[in-house]
Amino acid sequence: PPRRLLPARRELPAMALKSLLILCHLGLVASLAPGDCAFVGIYGDQDDFALVLMEDADGEVLSLTEEYPTNDHFKVRKSVMAKTHVSDAKRGAVLKKADFEADSASFVAPTALTVFTGSQEAPTPLCSINLEAKQGSVNRKLSEEVSVVMGSVLR
């Protein structure tokens, strides 16, 4: 029988996965994407928060803003960057206000918080929390957040 020059069909997915792993290892694939962090605590008395990383930061610079992404519009007017140690944070790390270059006057009684990568002009939101959500509207707001994040992922 003649020799095949192309791999068999069932080998293609395995080859694609291996290629993706090599790209990730070389740092050619972005490590953080929308949904790769989640706010898990808000402490009103101290204007503090806790968020958990779902993936390693892998050297990426995180920023925090009081802006909230709506539909496919996300404009950042003011933000603070994470401290340098955050770029080495591993999956499962819990970050707080102290992990960002925020002073005591920053983020006092915020109405929303969003962690993003990129610049203020071209931000990529990773996770957000709307602190103005009315009781009973949480499910609607959550579905809006999911559609905003998923819209960002699908682009």
Image (cartoon, rainbow, N blue to C red):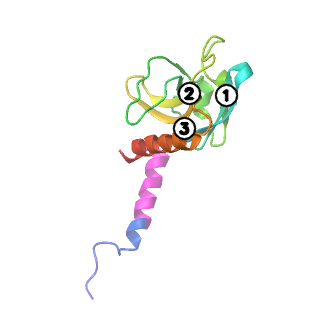
The answer to whether 28 is drawn above or below residue 96 in the figure is: below
Which residue is label 2 attached to? 113
For image coordinates 63% across by 16% down, the residue present is 108
For image coordinates 59% across by 44% down, the residue present is 54
User: Badge 1: few (under 14), some or many (20 or more) residues near its Cα, within 10 Å?
Assistant: some
Judge whether residue 34 can be spotted in this image: no
Q: What's the distance in space between the residues labelled 2 and 1, CA to CA?
A: 9 Å
Image quadrant containing the C terminus: top left
Does label 2 or label 1 sit earlier along the sequence?
1
Please name whichever residue, 149 or 86, is drawn nearer the observer in this view of the structure. Answer: 149
Tell whether position 18 is magenta.
yes
Label placed on residue 58 = 3
Q: Secondary structure at mark 2?
A: strand
* Amino acid type of the residue tagged 1 in the rendering: Phe
Which residue is label 1 attached to? 49
* Amino acid type of the residue tagged 2 in the rendering: Leu
Q: Residue 102: which quarter of the image?
A: top right
Question: What is the residue that sits farthest to the left in this orientation?
Answer: 2
Magenta residues span 14-31
Compared across the picture, whether 8 is left or right of 118 comes to left
Question: What is the residue that sits farthest to the bottom in this orientation?
Answer: 1
Tell whether position 94 is magenta.
no
User: Badge 3: few (under 14), some or many (20 or more) residues near its Cα, within 10 Å?
Assistant: some
For image coordinates 56% across by 27% down, the residue present is 113
User: Decide: marks 2, 1 in contact (CB < 8 A)?
Assistant: yes
What is the x, y in percent for residue 61?
51, 28
Q: Secondary structure at mark 1?
A: strand
